[in-house]
Amino acid sequence: MTREELVRAVRTKRSLLCVGLDTEENMLPEPFRSLHHPVRAFNHAIIEATHDLAVAYKLNLAFYEARGTEGWQDLESAVALINRVGGCFTIADAKRGDIGNTARKYAEAFFTNLGFDAITLSPYMGRDSITPFLGQRGKWAIVLGATSNEGAEDFQFLKVGENKEPLYAKVIADVARWGTPNDLMFVVGGTRPDVLKAARAAAPGHFFLVPGIGAQGGNLNAVLDAAITSDGGVLVNSSRGILQAGNGDDAVAMARKAAQTLQREMETALRRRGVV
């Protein structure tokens, strides 16, 4: 999906919603647990119920890799359905980070074979761990910039350089020069609006993938105030808030309702800023 197509989806759906398909078999709603392929069936139901509200889906690879062959088949099936439905950006939340032929093979695996639009990457190994994922039309590297976990304080907020800027701000500013706003995004956690504002200053034209809304404590309006741009510029992820919205026969309907609530808040913010 190109940037133009992504922005069109934002404006058409009046949404910045990314649904996180971090699907755990033991957390599935009761009606799905007895099915032959329970995770696959649930993912398909969620996609069918939310694809008109969401502009993106993020699949955390750990939840699929941990289940071996069955998990990989569920992953492939979900991505294939999203691509058939159309109009949605697909993210492999893999957090890969390697160099040379290894990075090239990761790009081949996720972009070519699995059909994802984007993959999350760790920048710790530097430029040659990121560039193999860049320069492919409609494909994106989403680089970890600033995260919301407790351990983020260990390294990301260290003061570096002559200006004593936080390390995360230097990472974002430097990595932004390796690609363009057409093939490079950043992960910026949603629990600290001040960090989002600093990240936006470091990369004013790039899309951000923002996790941490809802169960992790991030406030949607604060996120949008800090990071939204004239063409949207933000993909706000919600996983548990949607997947675990209900547990009975109405689970999928409740998931749609949760997604719709977020979409409506996003639409209000987009209209207020003249994006739609």
Image: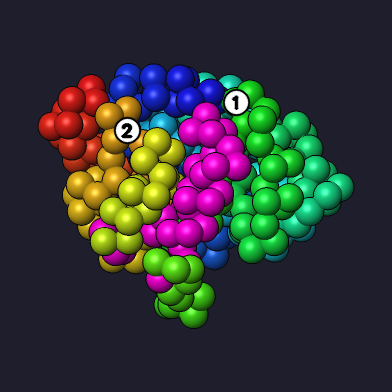
Mark 1, residue position: 138
Toward the viewer: 163 or 89? 163
Q: Is residue 168 magenta?
A: yes
Amino acid type indicated by mark 2:
Gly
Who's the residue at 32% across and 56% down the image? 198
Structural crowding at the residue carrying mark 1, measured as other residues with C-alpha within 10 Å and reported as few (<14), some (14–19) or many (≥20): some
Residue 232's disc is 2
Toward the viewer: 62 or 99? 99
Query: What is the tally of numbered marks visible in this picture?
Result: 2
**Extent of the magenta region:** 164-193
Left or right position of 135 against 17:
right
Amino acid type indicated by mark 1:
Gly
Question: Which quadrant would the C terminus be assigned to in this image?
Answer: top left
Structural crowding at the residue carrying mark 2, measured as other residues with C-alpha within 10 Å and reported as few (<14), some (14–19) or many (≥20): many
Considering every residue shown, the one lying at the far front of the view is 162
Q: Is residue 31 visible to the viewer in this orientation of the structure? A: no
Q: Is residue 7 visible to the viewer in this orientation of the structure? A: yes
Question: Which quadrant would the N terminus be assigned to in this image?
Answer: top right
| Vertical side of 22 occupied by 85: above or below | above
How far from the left and from the top, in percent, is residue 143?
Answer: 55, 51
Q: Is residue 275 magenta?
A: no
Mark 1 residue element: loop
How far from the left and from the top, in percent, is residue 105?
Answer: 82, 44
